[in-house]
Amino acid sequence: MASVRIDGDDLVVEIEGMDRLWSLKSRLVIPLANVCGATADPGIAAEPKGLRAPGTSLPGVITAGTFHQDGERVFWNIRDGARAVVIELADEHYDRLVVEVVDPAATVALIEQVVLR
């Protein structure tokens, strides 16, 4: 699971618990200027992930870490796809972040509110 918050001009994604170990990350800090938007996408867990490097993938259990597919680099950290949020980025190390959060609707609203400023 991850927590997502706004800290000044940055979007901060904190990876929680043992997911830090599986994803090989504990925190991602993205300038808000590079955040394009966010959507709740419960179906994304069933989509192909691409090549894992580095990270963890146990289908139906956990997807965590960096995955490469179709020229994109995507950070994943989900166990329950029903709580997945996709954050679109530009000019960043990752093209997208796919993270599981407690409240997808509230997380999307938070991100969309600051992106529209």
Image (tube, rainbow, N blue to C red):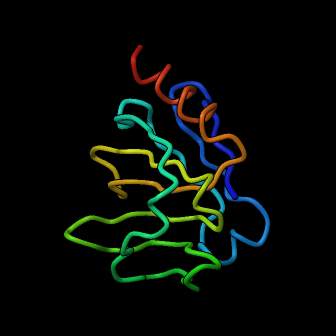
Rendered image quadrant of residue 8:
top right
Q: Residue at x 72, y 46 (%)?
A: 102
Q: Position of residue 68 (x, y in %)?
A: 32, 74
Above-or-below relation of 98 to 64: above
Extreme residue in the top direction: 117
Q: Position of residue 104 (x, y in %)?
A: 61, 41
Q: Quadrant of the C terminus?
A: top left
Q: Nearer the viewer, residue 29 or 67?
A: 67
Rendered image quadrant of residue 52:
bottom left
Q: Quadrant of the N terminus?
A: bottom right
Q: Residue at x 53, y 34 (%)?
A: 108
Horizontal side, residue 43 vs residue 77: left or right: left
Q: Position of residue 95 (x, y in %)?
A: 32, 55
Rendered image quadrant of residue 60:
bottom right
Horizontal side, residue 57 vs residue 61: left or right: left
Above-or-below relation of 63 to 106: below
Q: Nearer the viewer, residue 85 or 67?
A: 85
Horizontal side, residue 94 vs residue 6: left or right: left
Above-or-below relation of 51 to 83: below
Extreme residue in the right direction: 17
Extreme residue in the left direction: 71
Q: Residue at x 44, y 45 (%)?
A: 87
